[in-house]
Each structure stands twice: as C-alpha cells, then as structure tokens.
C-alpha cells in the first residue's frame, strides 16, 4: 500500500493558496490610494474564517538629514501621487532658485573653500600684465619694454654700431634694486655667439670709462657625473640640469645685491678637465656692469636690468650648429615655446646672417 505525502492533498494546496492570496490582498490594502486617501483596514473573505486581523501601515519615525552641505533630498516635500501631479517634487524654498555661478579666479575660489585669504596679485611698476594663462607676469625690475605682439620691425645694423648703441643705452639704465651695479643678459644659443656681442659692448663701455665684467655660463657647468647622468645626449638634462643656476645666484648675482662687496666669481668649473677652476674673485667697482652671456638665461628669473636676445630662425640655427650638437636643437625649440625670449627680451637681434644683423632699436 502506497501512502502519499500530505502535500499532495488538493485540500492542503487550496489552503496554502488561500493564505498567500490573503497576504497579497492585505499588502495591497496598505498601499496609499489615489488622490491621497488613507488606506482602511478591512477583513477579507479569506481572513474572516481564520479570524486574522488585516495589516495596517505603521508610520516610521521621521529621519533627520544634515543640511551642512545644502538642502537634502530627505527634506523635500512629495506631492500625493495622482492625476496632474504624478511624480512631481516640491523643493524647499532655499533650493528652488538655482545657485549663483562661482565668481573670481580659481585661486580665489580655492582660498574661499579652504578658509584662507585669497592671494593678491602683485601691483606696481614691476608687474607686466598679460602673462600666460591670463595671470600677471611678474618681473624683477621696472622700465621693461612691453612684450612684442605680432610682427616686429627690425632695422639692419653692423655689429660695431650695435655694440656702441647698446653701450650708450646701458649708460641710461638704472638698477632696479637701487644697487650700484647694472646686470645685463646676452641670451642666445651657442651658434648665435652671444659672447662676441658681450665682448663688443665691454670694449665700448671701457672706452667710455665704465668698468664691466663679462661672465659666461659655460664656466658654470655642473660636474660630468651630474650633467651626464642620463646620457651624453639627453635633451631634458641639457635644458634643465647642465648649468649650475644655484652657483650663478650665489657667486655672481649675490655679491652684486645691495650691500654686497662686488667680488664676483668669473667661473667655477672646467668642463674639459672636469675640475674646479679655482679662479680668484674679480672685484667689480660700483657703477660697473655685469655682462652675462649664455643660453636659456631668461627662464631662471635672474635679476637682469636689461636683456638682449640673439634670435636665430630654425633653419639658421640648424645650419650654424655643429652636426654633432644637433641633438640640442629640441631644447631651443622648447625654450622658444615656453619662455618666448623674442617677446620677453628688451632688445631683440636677428642674427640669421652672421654678417648682417638686424635689431628692433
């Protein structure tokens, strides 16, 4: 005789189906009706024989949301679901109007968020507006020629005449820091030979009875172990790490600051022997001129009172640069792109033709 399980009894299935339907009906009864009418507890036909009370919704405690960072969605008022306003949300009064867009520069907004005073832009005669990215470009002296915009008118001139005119102009330049020494930059690639022009100006100043000292950045190269750490032809190292700018600040510009003794170190390191030169310091009398020549001078914020840039076009720079030094050409392209020395310098000299220079006067 085979005995079947109790769940196979059709009567048991009907009872379970009735209980499931009763739970579903009770849940539907607890749902809010249209137009916001409140649900009413009721006894269903399936529940009456079982004496089971209907389910009614139990209100939960209101939650509290922080408003430290603006209105919360928890504080919004929901309209009853129904015709004409289905799914609509009424925001608090302080959130109904759109917030005002942020004002001020990025630095000012960042300072307000951090609770710090906004950085003030430098003012005065030592500031030139129109820097990169819209920020003011700061310079360390007054009386600088404004940056060139668009084509620059150049005038043909000879090298001897150019040396005399630059010397005459230097006699009218006053040091920006009020010290007794004038600092001049002759900036240009080695192929432009800025040291030759510095020598011509020195001779013109000597004839006029003014002392001057010519210093080349080639005497302030870093040791080979540092300079060639990433290889003999690493462009980034050549651009950023070959020249000891810290030594230039300390040994050349430091003694010429107000209150300095004027004793300048003309060179520091010999790249041929890779040894210190041990050169004695050279005293520069008050009223004298420092003529510093070399590449990439206008990107280090040196305190020059007058800057001269010798410009070579890309073709002329390639032709006049020795072939074994062509690997340095990308560094000068980067310098022209980042610093724009043709627009930054006070005096611009075009030296594509070694015998026929031209300048902006």
Image: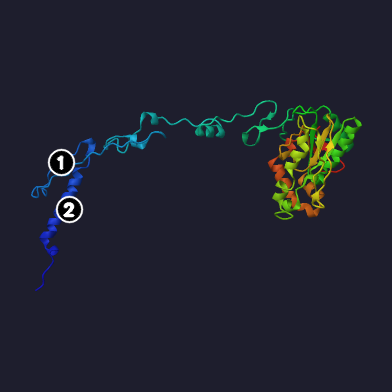
- Taking the view exactly as shown, the residue that stands out farthest to the right is 207
One can see residue 357 in this view: no
Q: Where is mark 1, residue-wise?
A: 41
> Foreground: 104 or 89?
104
Judged left or right of residue 118, residue 307 is: right
How far apart are the two marked residues, 1 and 2, measured between alpha carbons? 18 Å
What is the tally of numbered marks visible in this picture?
2
Seen at 10% across and 70% down, the residue is 3
| Quadrant hosting residue 229 | bottom right
Dot 2 falls on a residue whose secondary structure is helix
**Position in image of residue 352 (x %, y %):** 82, 43
Circle 2 crowding by C-alpha within 10 Å: few under 14, some 14–19, many from 20: few
Between disc 1 and disc 2, whose residue precedes? 2
Q: In which quadrant of the rendered view does residue 2 lie?
A: bottom left
Q: Quadrant of the N terminus?
A: bottom left
Q: Residue furthest top?
A: 124
Quarter of the image where the C terminus is located: top right
- Residue 252, position in %: x, y? 78, 38
Q: Secondary structure at mark 1?
A: loop
Q: Is residue 84 depicted above or below 54 in this figure?
A: above
Q: In this picture, is 233 found above or below 345? A: below
Q: Which residue does the image show at 13% across and 66% down from the upper left? A: 5
- Report if the CB atoms under discs 1 and 2 are less than 8 Å apart: no
Q: Nearer the viewer, residue 128 or 348?
A: 128
Residue in view at x 31 percent, y 38 percent: 87
Residue 14, given in percent of the width and then of the height, sits at 12, 57
The 10 Å Cα crowd at callout 1, few under 14, some 14 to 19, many 20 or more, is some
Front in this rendered view, residue 134 or 261: 261
- Occupied quadrant, residue 135: top right
In the rendering, at what x and y percent does residue 130 appear?
66, 32
Q: Please give the residue where the numbered disc 2 appears in the rendered image.
A: 20
Display coloring: rainbow
């Amino acid at each position: 005789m085979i005995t079947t399980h109790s769940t196979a009894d059709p009567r048991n299935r009907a009872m379970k189906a009735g209980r499931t339907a009763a739970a579903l009906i009770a849940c539907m009864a607890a749902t809010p009706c249209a137009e916001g009418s409140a649900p009413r507890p009721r006894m269903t036909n399936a529940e009456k024989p079982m004496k089971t009370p209907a389910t009614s919704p139990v209100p939960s405690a209101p939650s509290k949301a922080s408003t430290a960072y603006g209105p919360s969605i928890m504080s919004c008022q929901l309209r009853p679901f129904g015709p004409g306003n289905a799914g609509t949300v009424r925001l608090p009064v302080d959130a109904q109007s759109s917030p005002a867009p942020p004002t001020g520069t990025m630095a000012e907004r960042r300072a307000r968020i951090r609770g710090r005073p906004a950085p003030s832009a430098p003012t005065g005669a030592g500031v030139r507006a129109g820097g990169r990215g819209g920020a003011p470009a700061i310079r360390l002296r007054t009386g600088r020629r404004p940056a060139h915009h668009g084509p620059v008118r150049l005038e043909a001139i000879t090298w001897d005449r150019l040396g005399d005119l630059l010397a005459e102009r230097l006699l009218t330049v006053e040091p920006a820091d009020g010290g007794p020494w004038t600092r001049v930059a002759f900036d240009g690639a080695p192929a432009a030979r800025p040291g030759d022009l510095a020598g011509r100006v020195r001779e013109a100043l000597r004839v006029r009875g003014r002392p001057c000292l010519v210093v080349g950045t080639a005497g302030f190269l870093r040791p080979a172990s540092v300079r060639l750490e990433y290889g003999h032809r690493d462009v980034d190292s050549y651009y950023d790490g070959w020249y000891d700018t810290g030594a230039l600040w300390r040994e050349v510009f430091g003694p010429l600051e107000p209150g300095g003794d004027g004793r300048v170190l003309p060179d520091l390191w010999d790249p041929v022997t890779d040894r210190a030169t041990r050169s004695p310091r050279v005293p520069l009398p008050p009223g004298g001129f420092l003529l510093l020549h070399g590449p990439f001078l206008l990107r280090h914020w040196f305190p020059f009172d007058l800057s001269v840039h010798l410009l070579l076009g890309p073709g002329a720079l390639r032709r006049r640069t020795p072939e074994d030094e062509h690997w340095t050409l990308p560094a000068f392209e980067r310098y022209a792109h980042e610093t724009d020395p043709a627009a930054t310098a006070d005096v611009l000299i075009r030296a594509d033709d070694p015998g026929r220079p031209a300048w902006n006067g």
